[in-house]
Image (cartoon, rainbow, N blue to C red):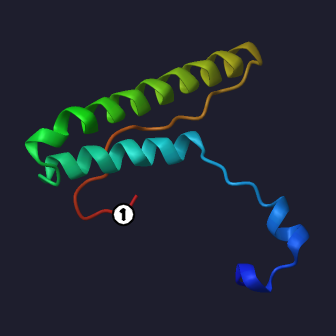
Amino acid sequence: MTEANKNPEEVQSEQPSVTVNDLVNIYNIIDLASKRGAFQAAELSSVGAIANKVKAFVDHVQAQQKAAAEAAGEQPAETSTDAPAEGQAS
């Protein structure tokens, strides 16, 4: 169903969201693109700064989730920040 066909209440109730896994994927995309030479030399510092910021945020959130899971006596879910092998979809 397209947004034009949705009822106004349905459109308003859909909140955009970004999950930690989305941020991990963003980091992996930046990492893979930089390895493939997608950025010019002048862009590398700003791209690297954003990648570092995303990675630091993901690491912080994952540490909080792990601590909360350990406090609750649960096994924390693992999320990898490794880029997928070339040719594999994430």
Q: Quadrant of the N terminus?
A: bottom right
Residue 72 image offset from top left, x and y in percent = 77, 18
Q: Secondary structure at mark 1?
A: loop
Left or right, 4 with reference to 64: right
Q: Is residue 16 above or below residue 73?
A: below
Residue placed farthest to the right in the image?
9
Name which quarter of the figure residue 8 lies in: bottom right
Name which residue lies at 64% across and 24% down.
65
Residue 23 image offset from top left, x and y in percent = 48, 42
The 10 Å Cα crowd at callout 1, few under 14, some 14 to 19, many 20 or more, is few
Residue occupied by mark 1: 89
Left or right, 33 with reference to 25: left
Foreground pick, 90 / 8: 8
Name which residue lies at 22% across and 58% down.
86
Residue 20 image offset from top left, x and y in percent = 56, 39
Name which quarter of the figure residue 14 lies in: bottom right
Name which quarter of the figure residue 51 lies in: top left
Residue 78 image offset from top left, x and y in percent = 52, 35
Left or right, 42 with reference to 53: left
Amino acid on which disc 1 is placed: Ala
Name which residue lies at 35% across and 34% down.
50
Total labels drawn: 1
